[in-house]
Amino acid sequence: MQSTRLEHKQGNWHGSFKAMASPCEVIMETEDKDEAAAILETVANEAWRIEHKFSRYRDDNIISRINSANGEAVEVDEETARLLDFSDQLYQMSDGMFDVTSGILRRAWLFDQSDNIPEQQQIDNLLPTIGWEKVSWTPPRIQLLPGMEIDLGGIGKEYAVDRCAQRVRDMSDISVLVNFGGDLAITRPRNDKQAWTIGRLSSDPDAPVGVIQLQQGALATSGDQHRYLEKDGVRYCHVLNPKTGWPVEDPPHTISVAAPTCIEAGMLSTMALLQGKQAEAFLKAQDIPHWIN
C-alpha cells in the first residue's frame, strides 16, 4: 500500500515515502504543516504516476505495450516521446554505450551481491536483441525487432525528481529538497541563502565520505554501492557495456555530479561510469562539479 509520512525536524517539515525501489525524501523550508502536507502529496503522487507509467516491471503501461508488440509499431504519447528522444541523444553522445535496449541483460546478470557470474553463452544469446540502432523511432511511433525491449530505468528516477521539483515550484515559493535515493534537486535557494547539506556515502553504506553543500540545482550519484557481484576477488559493477554484455571495467565505486537538472546530472554520472577507469578524465573534460571515490 502506498503511503507517506510527515514529521517536523530541525525547523523543517520532512516528508517520506517509497517509489522506484528507493527511499524518497522531501525536505521543506516551512513551518506551515498544511503547506508541507500538500507539497508531499503532490510529489508522492507524481513519483508514483511516473513509476506506474514507465516501470519495466508492470504489464499495464506504455513500456509493456512497446516490449510486447512483437515487431509491430506502437504510437506513444508526448511525454514518452520526449524520453525516447532523450534516449536517442544519450545513445549518440555516448557512442552507443548508453543504450536503453540493454536492460534485457538483466536476464543474465542478477546483481544480488553474490558470486553468480553468468556463462558467456547466456550473454551471447542476448546480444543480438541489444542495440538502439536496430530500433525504428519516428515520432510518435516506435518499432522494436521481435525479442527486443526498452528499459528507461537509467533515466526514469532523475526525470521523476525534475518533474516533482517543477510541480513544487508551480505551487510554492519555498525552498524544497526533493531526494529520491540520492538523486535530488532543489526547487529554489533557501531564504537565508544557506546551502542544503547532503551526505555522500562510499561503497560501504555505513561509511560516509563527507558532505556536499548545494545551494541550487541538482545532484545525481551512480555506482555499485548496493548492486554488484564479487568472485575470486573481482568486483563486478552493475553498469553493463551493451556492446560486450559484461560490466564496465574498473569504474569508480561512486560518482556524484552536480548540474542544473537531475536528469543532466544523472546522464553525466552514468556516462562517466561507463568510461570505467577513464571516468575522472571524462568528468574533468566536461568541467562540471563532481565527486569520485
Image: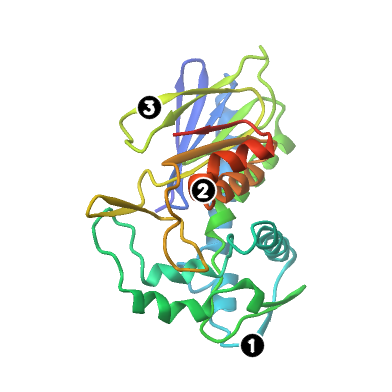
For image coordinates 42% across by 48% down, the residue present is 250
Q: Kindly report the distance in space between the C-alpha atoms of the residues bearing marks 3 and 1.
A: 48 Å
For image coordinates 70% across by 36% down, the residue present is 260
Give percent across and percent down for residue 13. 51, 25
Q: Kindly report the distance in space between the C-alpha atoms of the residues bearing marks 1 and 2.
A: 34 Å
Which tag, 1 or 2, sits closer to the chain's start?
1
Tag 1: amino acid: Glu
Which tag, 3 or 1, sits closer to the chain's start?
1
Left or right of residue 261, residue 148 in this image: left
Left or right of residue 21, residue 112 in this image: left
Label 1: which secondary element: loop
Which labelled disc corresponds to residue 208? Answer: 3
Residue toward you, 136 or 283: 283
Tag 3: amino acid: Pro
Which labelled disc corresponds to residue 273? Answer: 2
* Dot 2 crowding, Cα within 10 Å, few <14, some 14–19, many 20+: many
- Quadrant in the picture for residue 217: top right
User: Which quadrant would the C terminus be assigned to in this image?
Assistant: top left
The residue carrying mark 1 is 72
In the depicted structure, whether residue 21 falls above or below residue 11: below
